[in-house]
Image (tube, grey):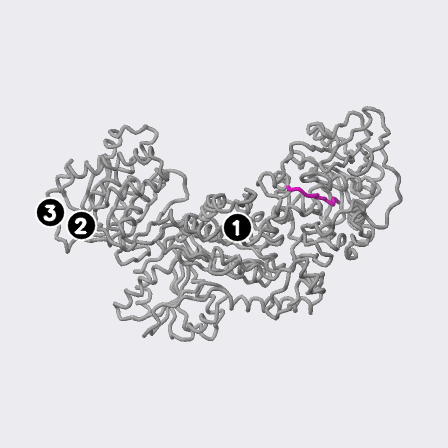
Amino acid sequence: MAVVDYQTEQQPAEIAREDVNINDFAIIVATPNGSGSQTANNTILRACFNMGIPVTGKNLFPSNIKGLPTWYSIRLSKDGYQARRHKRDVLVAMNPASFGDDLQSLEPGGICLYPDDSRQELSRSDVTYFPMPVKELVKNSGVDASLRDYIANMVYVGVLAHLVGIEVAEIESALNKHFKGKQKAIASNMNVVNAAVAWAAANISTPSPFRVERMDKTKGMIMLDGNTSGALGSVFGGVSFVAWYPITPSTSLVDALNDYLPELRIDKETGKPTYAVVQAEDELAAIGMIIGAGWAGARSMTATSGPGISLMAEFTGLAYFTEVPCVVWDVMRMGPSTGMPTRTGQGDLLSAYFLSHGDTQHVCLLPASVKECFEFGWRSFDLAERLQTIVFVLSDLDLGMNQWMSEPFEYPTEPMDRGKVLDAEALTAVGDWGRYRDVDGDGIPFRTLPGTNHPKAAFFTRGSGHNQDAKYTERSDEWVANMDRLARKFETARTIVPAPIMVNEENATIGILSYGSNDPAIIEALDRLRELNINAAYQRVRALPFTKEVGEFVAKYERIYVVDNNYNGQMAQLLRMEYPELAGRIIAVASCDGLPLTARWVTESVQKGEA
Amino acid sequence: MATTKATPKPKINLLGFEQGEYKGAPSTLCPGCGHDSISSRIVSVCFELGVQPYQVAKFSGIGCSSKTPAYFLGRSHGFNSVHGRMPSVATGAIVTNRNLIGLAVSGDGDTGSIGMGQFKHLVRRNVPMVYIVENNGVYGLTKGQFSATADIGQKLKYAGLNELPPIDLCAEAIIGGATFVARSFAGDPRQVEALLKAALSHRGLAILDIISPCVTFNNHEDSTKSYAYGKEHEERLHDMTFIRAQEEITVDYEEGEAIPVKMHDGSTIVLKKLENEYDPTNRVAALARLDAARENQEFITGLIYVNQNNNRTIHDLLHMDEQPLSQLSAEQLRPSKEALESVLADLY
């Protein structure tokens, strides 16, 4: 144990309070994939949250079932920042395979917890080391041998709790939540946590320069991931048909639907489900099914990721042209091709917007928070049915699969909008109708549902040329008239999709425009930029097509930094296309490395541009 | 022989509709196309049975055959979708509204090539509907390429010689778990009608593979999908008579000569055996017969396989209520504010 001796000699027994970092640091837990560290990491996250400290948890995982390195980062931020933090302060190094790199990634003055049987070289002298007797504590706990690997992670929970001051009672409360009150599981985990805390109290005399202290900043807040939020929003939006095909990182959205639908959507009178979920044979079938369902009157949706929307391209054009309402969640990951399937990105913005052959353009919603995932979950159906079109919701892996704290969700503020549907009674009243006639001048036609008991209800739905009465046509004038109407409908969409959010307009000299999960990094960067005397107004776009506010914003500032988490700066490209006369103002700030953006990167990018 | 009481063809049917109410737009297919003959059969069968046209939903993919839903049942909603992927569209619609009477038309290319995956999964899910393959062994709209159902040794002007073995869609359907599988010939209107009636009475997915000659590209002398070949070589497994639930069965056959198959809706198909020992309720025998037909290049037609028991449909599997999803009210679809509060309570 020479290393420990070296530690105790070098480190003071106490650190002056002003030198202690309280509630403003990042913990990184490095483990081999599949080692069951998720419970331990969630426990730390939840316990800090319960102590009133703003926290976010991000899982950086490989496309692998077992063995490859995986990391969980927990950021504590007394100021409430939720973006990925560039710095790593506390390392829990449970993975020998990545130990060297992990150690190098620590900030000077950081601390490193590691299993005491690790044979890794402790190569940095500006780091404080804390070896943990993981094997011994687990062995002593008497837990079943098959569970030892999983429960071993509770050792670092206990040691860390002692070192940085996480309250043990909150750890127990977190485990209670995690195991939904299952006493046996809670007890066997707490057993190890308590043993680890006791061991640490007796054996560690070196203080940690990082500490947590109780705050009151999470009171009334909830914590969950974007996929669960989107699923909940969909459930409250009245989703009645779901077809899907498994693909990371969207699978957990459907998992959440399968969790919540049976709980919330069983009809009280009949005891039967008011929904259907079908696992399709592929993404082509998934979207085909939701189009059939939307056509027949369901609120239908699927959830997928980039490779899925590529496969859905042909059907997307059909939904657009036949004007069938349906919702597609694209939880974006890194492309092209398989790309980095478990890493985040925003590379599908352009492909989703223009998906399919011919002239197509689609309504896309761009949620930036779990709260917005919930809201767009229900709102997407209203928009799809109002506009009679396919609506994309573009989330991403970072938003969808990571843990975010949030204000509680608001119950849908508007009644359900089922759009322009003529039933038998209405058909009798109107007398004459045509499926693709623009009666109201908003480009949105009326439709009937199959099975409507009326001689005039039927129409023929086809992807081939059709006139305003849904009859087959190859006449140029009828084709053009229909495309003109679809364009009018898109202009209507522009006026009813969610408008952008404006931040920090006062005294601003430049603009920052972005969307989706880049939001927390930009919010934090605005503060850093202000410290550098750069005052930036920030517009967060929430939907495509652009509403009028977007054009106004771009026109207002001489330089607009457009922040994208993709390689080509796709939002910047879109803005240049939409506002060619203002294209010179658009400065693309794009990053694509598989990681969520950091405030530091945003700040430095804008600073560089302003220099 | 089984017969029904002879009644003159009524001008109006049970629902009070004239046959004209079941017609569609004029066909744009080549004159003499087998598909048009099948469309006519659909019109007359739906009229005769008194099928409620407003409840019918027609589905198709892409191809000559897939154009035909525009040419029958003009009072019914129709969805001409994308190539090979109509089964998914139909699945979504029929799960959403279980009252719809699904009537799908596809072709050999649409089903046997690009749509093979969806076809197999449609069968697997047992989506209750009638699925007709208008099978001519050739791609018409793209002017004469072989499809996957073309026999070995077939020749086409454009495509030359086919050296690949054919896909037998009936065998694929049976292997996939289909509970109603039939093969017929567009040039045998009586049998097509009897099978269509039985298919509409079936609970679950009914597959009809109908050889339907392409008069433009595949009706030459040595084609196995021509009118002449069909007329000469068709081997009916049985003579079929469809008897509606309301009608009295006047049976006229010796014990063992015919098999009456009771359908789910109370109707009966009486299959008078033409081939001894052929039992269409025996799955293994059905597959063996199809294989023998392939081996000997026989053109067998009739109800190849039927199973009226043990066929859970997708509605059963999803525990669907009688009330279709499409008719749910906003109150049924959106949980209460209290429900949201209770969900959120677990997330604080």
Q: Position of residue A174 (x, y in %)?
A: 31, 43
Q: Residue at x 69, y 33 (%)?
A: B308
Q: Position of residue B47 (x, y in %)?
A: 80, 48
Q: Residue at x 22, y 37 (%)?
A: A196
The one nearer the camera, B108 or A329, is: A329
The disc, 3 or 2, on the residue closer to the chain's N-terminal end is 3
The disc, 1 or 3, on the residue closer to the chain's N-terminal end is 3
Residue stretch in magenta: B127-135
In the rendered image, the vertical position of residue B236 relative to residue B69, given as above or below: above
Q: Which residue is labeled 2 in the image?
A: A209
Q: Name which residue type carries label 3.
A: Pro
- Whole-angstrom CA distance, mark 3 to mark 2, is 11 Å
Q: Which residue is labeled 1 in the image?
A: A302
Q: Secondary structure at mark 1?
A: strand
* Circle 1 chain: A
Q: Secondary structure at mark 3?
A: loop
Q: Is residue A306 visible?
A: no
- The quadrant of the picture occupied by the N terminus of chain B is top right
